[in-house]
Image: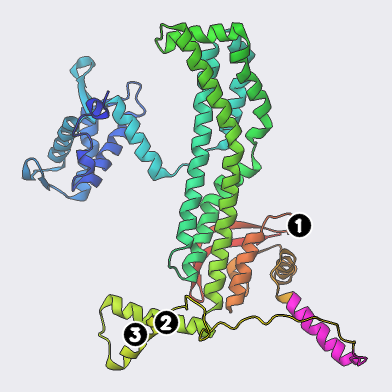
Amino acid sequence: MSFFNIVGASFFKPLTSSYKEVYLDCLNMIYECCKYQMSNSEEKSIVVERLSDYFEERNQKNFVFEEEGEESFADGRSVALEFIRKLKGFGWIDEEIGKNYISRIYFNDYAITILESFRKIVSEEEAEYQSIIQTIYSIAVNEDAYRQKPYENVLIGLQENIERLIKELKKLNTSIKKYIDKATENKDAAEIIEDYFTYHKEIGSKAYHRLKTGDNISRYRPQILDRLNRFTEDEDILARTIRGYMVVQNEEDPVKAESEIKGLVHYLKGELKNYDAIIEEIENKNVRYINSAIERAKFLLSTDKNIEGKLNKILEMYVHKWNTGKEEMQEEEETFLHIFDIFQSGFLDGESFYTPRESKGENNGEQFSEECFDDSELARQREQMDQKLKALVTQKSICEYVDTVLSDKGMMLGSAFPLSTNEDFIKLIFVRFFAGKKGTGYRVEPTGKMIRVNGFRFADFRIVR
């Protein structure tokens, strides 16, 4: 059956009209009124009162509808009744006369499914992977269920929860890709750093952290696979499963029922085995996003003062002026147009900028000079080497930096760290990056406050030993 044969051709009209926000607000308010009732409905008078208050607060009584044209209403109650009438016509809600001849408003079953999906998108709820994994395991090892109704009590439950787990993992995978795409956009360093902390708050410290620290499906997978094999290897369980499938799915052919059951078992086993591949892809994307964000920020922070960075700033300034059209190009500025004619050479010849590498002849070696450095020269060379080693950003150097700044303190805000130079901001990024890793000796806690320091805006956090 066609989807629109069920919901109707005009079902989505309110969500594409000029008043789509108003319609969606009305649907959410009606949903809130109905969801706690046993019959999933509410008295019409209560719904009208709730919508009336909404329209009175908006002070909106004039509407231009596509079908009727412009209409004016006397008060919020009249507007509420009109929107209820329209939602009924679009197929979202319906009305029935209950006990004592009281009119009640209720959602059509398909409308509830779609509206709940909209609400999940807006709320951005994160799945609790450990809970889903525990549910899958509990269903699989329930021996009593195999002796009673294995299809209804085991196989259906395993299918629903395994599919839900894989679906949530794919959503996490997609959300990380969204942040990777953001890191490659034309953003300045402050925006990239802000996106990084947002990513860590919404993905790194929530979904990804739970996924890595909670129970993993691999721990229970051998037992779950063993239980799934029972549906094809144990004749008694298979016979009971076939009978249950025929009743639930209204199937009359036992041969076809058996084929469908074996196909479902094979599919679920494949999903469990593909779990590791999805986790590996999520891990790779997580590492790639963190590296991309840090490298992009380092590049933007380190190129402002060299020739390339200054030239880039000049070009950005003129591109902005041309694109905005707020200022016409002066005659002397026309010379800068030739900058954009610079291109790389695509071939090699005698006139090319390319310098051929000279072939190395036979090296017979040279005798070492007997000249020796004095103690002061050796000390100077060692000092230069020490300075180069200290400049390297490693987990050990960052831990030493944190220990130096914290001194005898047990906790300190990230905004309280030295942040006077670009190098200080880069160190702060790595302090956040290495937090909680093995051997660091400190962790970070978000404060929930956005701050601005020296032109950079980021979510502040605590560094705790």
Front-most of residues 380 and 401: 380
Q: Is residue 427 left or right of residue 198?
A: right
Mark in front: 2 vs 1? 2
Cβ–Cβ under 8 Å for marks 2 and 1: no
Q: How is the image coloured?
A: rainbow
Query: Could you tell me how far apart the alpha carbons at marks 3 and 1 are, in whole angstroms?
Result: 54 Å
First reached walking from the N terminus: tag 3 or tag 1: 3
Cβ–Cβ under 8 Å for marks 3 and 1: no
First reached walking from the N terminus: tag 3 or tag 2: 3
Badge 3: residue crowd in 10 Å (few <14, some 14–19, many ≥20): few
Q: Is residue 178 magenta?
A: no
Residue 342 numbered tag: 2
Badge 2: residue crowd in 10 Å (few <14, some 14–19, many ≥20): few
Task: Give the quarter of the figure containing the C terminus.
Answer: bottom right
- Using the rendered image of the protein, determine whether residue 319 is visible from the camera's viewpoint: yes
Q: Which residue is mark 3?
A: 337
Q: Type of residue at label 2? A: Ile
Q: Which residues are magenta?
A: 369-389
Q: Is residue 375 magenta?
A: yes
